[in-house]
């Protein structure tokens, strides 16, 4: 055997470290003078080499296993770093190593090093989606309500949707403060009644102290979805999509959006569920179509039958969704993790606690506490970094949750008139239609949708 193909600097380095490694020197002695018949006659440090004793040779001060160099303990980390250049994955790095070098438990050492690589962890793809978690089907109309704010043609709107009936309301917002949102919600609650549960995202309108006082005064439970995970507020997100489609189509054909909304509320979902109006009001509402008085009379639909039908529909959706999903392992308090951001998993943190909301955790990172969904938290085999203690929670990754911050955050946003007629009067902030959302993102409208 020969090692002349190894560069002179690497060869001398490998020789020097091999000569200083007590385990490899003992191994070299057994290779030259013969092996004992039984394993227990060997020093413990040499035991891992016993199964390969027939393949081991010594050439010019370097131990070889076949044609692969045996690397001393002091150089193993450096060699793993060299083989991991370009950041190949765990298995790729193992394949690279198995062809050129050897030491006991090499695969384990490579796996530990690569899985703790911060660059590799920060660029990992999104985690697999988890099985669908269904919200409880309410027993009564307007018992569970969801709300969200959306933007259409540079104007902001509030949507409120009932989980039981699918009935949704649309309101134009003159600004994005808690006071304005609360005023709109009070109007709907005064008509349909105060709900038992209100679901929203973590916008500052909904996390301010004023909104907490509103929830306490009107006696409803306020549940917030996981930040950066709109799917957990899917009821409101679906209503936003329906509202945007309705408004865009009405704008394009020049028809009355409220007359169109009246018609949609009377469109039955199926024979058993009926229309949103029939589920919420127990009757059809009068439209411009000719209809007999008999059909306008209240006809109560059994809540148990409606609930069973709604549950059946949601379970069917869950079966289809879960085909390409798998549960993620739960996280433990104190575990080192990485948080998903638009740039990847480039923020490290430590799990503080499990939230009462499903699959939601509080993670401390850079002195702040963030609430995130499990799908956006990647377990990392990295050393924990020093975290500053903090008393304030950054549930949405933004500073503060007070009413003053609420106003300040949106002081540069586009303000709109409160007249209902402006639903047909979009007002772009610039002639080319480019505008900035309430979160600071610059949006450029699709040229296909321009007039």
Image (cartoon, grey):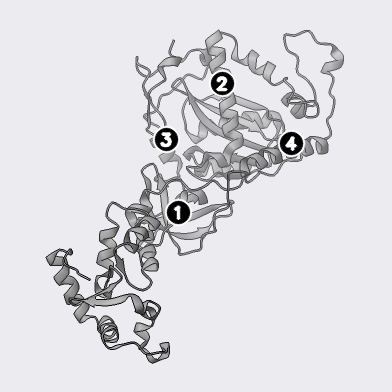
Does dot 4 land on a helix, a strand or a loop? helix
Mark earlier in primary sequence (1, 3): 1
Which one is nearer the viewer's eye here, 123 or 445? 123
Q: Which mark is residue 245?
A: 2
Q: Which residue is pictured at 31% across the width and 53% down the height?
A: 87
Does dot 1 land on a helix, a strand or a loop? strand
- Kindly report the distance in space between the C-alpha atoms of the residues bearing marks 1 and 4: 34 Å
Answer few, some or many: residues within 10 Å of disc 3's Cα (few below 14, many 20 plus, some between 14 and 19): some
Q: Position of residue 446 (x, y in %)?
A: 42, 20
Q: Which residue is mark 4?
A: 310
- Kindly report the distance in space between the C-alpha atoms of the residues bearing marks 4 and 2: 23 Å
Does dot 2 land on a helix, a strand or a loop? helix
Determine contact: label 4, label 3, CB under 8 Å.
no
Q: Which residue is pictured at 58% across the width and 44% down the height?
A: 324
Which one is nearer the viewer's eye here, 22 or 416? 22
Question: Does residue 386 appear in the picture of this structure?
Answer: no
Single out the residue that lies furthest toward the right: 294
Q: Which residue is mark 3?
A: 407
Determine contact: label 1, label 4, CB under 8 Å.
no
Does dot 3 land on a helix, a strand or a loop? helix
Q: Which residue is pictured at 66% across the width and 41% down the height?
A: 318
Q: Position of residue 258 (x, y in %)?
A: 62, 15
Q: Which mark is residue 378?
A: 1
Question: Does residue 299 appear in the picture of this structure?
Answer: yes
């Amino acid at each position: 055997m020969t090692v002349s193909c190894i560069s002179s600097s690497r060869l001398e380095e490998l020789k020097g470290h091999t000569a200083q490694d007590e385990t490899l020197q003992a191994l070299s002695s057994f290779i030259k003078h013969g092996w004992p018949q039984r394993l227990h006659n060997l020093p413990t440090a040499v035991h891992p080499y016993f199964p390969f004793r027939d393949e081991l040779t010594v050439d010019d001060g370097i131990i070889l296993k076949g044609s692969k160099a045996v690397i001393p303990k002091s150089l193993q980390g450096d060699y793993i770093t060299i083989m991991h250049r370009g950041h190949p994955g765990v298995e790729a790095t193992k394949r690279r190593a198995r062809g050129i070098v050897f030491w006991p438990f090499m695969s384990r050492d490579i796996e530990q090093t690569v899985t703790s690589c911060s660059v590799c962890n920060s660029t990992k793809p999104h985690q697999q989606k988890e099985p669908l978690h269904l919200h409880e089907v309410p027993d009564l109309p307007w018992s569970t309500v969801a709300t969200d704010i959306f933007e259409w043609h540079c104007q902001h709107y509030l949507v409120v949707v009932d989980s039981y009936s699918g009935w949704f309301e649309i309101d134009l917002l003159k600004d994005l403060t808690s006071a304005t949102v609360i005023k709109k919600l009070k109007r709907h609650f005064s008509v349909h009644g105060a709900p038992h549960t209100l679901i929203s995202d973590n916008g500052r309108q909904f996390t301010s102290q004023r909104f907490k006082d509103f929830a306490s005064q009107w006696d409803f439970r306020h549940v917030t979805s996981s930040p950066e995970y709109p799917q957990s507020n899917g009821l409101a997100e679906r209503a936003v999509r329906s509202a945007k489609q309705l408004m865009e189509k009405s704008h394009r054909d020049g028809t009355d959006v409220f007359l169109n909304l009246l018609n949609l509320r009377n469109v039955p979902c199926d024979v058993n569920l009926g229309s949103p109006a029939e589920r919420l009001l127990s009757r059809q509402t009068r439209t411009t179509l000719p209809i007999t008085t008999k059909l306008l009379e209240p006809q109560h639909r059994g809540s148990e039958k409606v609930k069973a039908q709604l549950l059946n529909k949601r379970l069917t959706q869950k079966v289809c969704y879960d085909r390409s999903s798998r549960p993620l392992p739960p996280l433990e308090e104190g575990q080192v993790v990485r948080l998903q951001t638009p740039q990847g998993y480039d923020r490290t943190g430590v799990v503080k606690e499990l939230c009462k909301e499903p699959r939601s955790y509080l993670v401390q990172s850079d002195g702040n506490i963030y609430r995130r969904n499990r799908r956006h938290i990647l377990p990392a085999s990295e050393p924990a970094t020093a975290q500053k203690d903090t008393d304030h929670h950054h549930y949405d990754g933004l500073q503060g949750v007070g009413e003053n911050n609420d106003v300040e955050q949106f002081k540069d946003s586009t303000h709109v008139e409160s007249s209902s007629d402006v639903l047909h009067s979009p007002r772009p902030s610039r002639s080319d239609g480019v505008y900035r959302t309430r979160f600071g993102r610059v949006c450029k409208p699709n040229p296909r949708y321009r007039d």
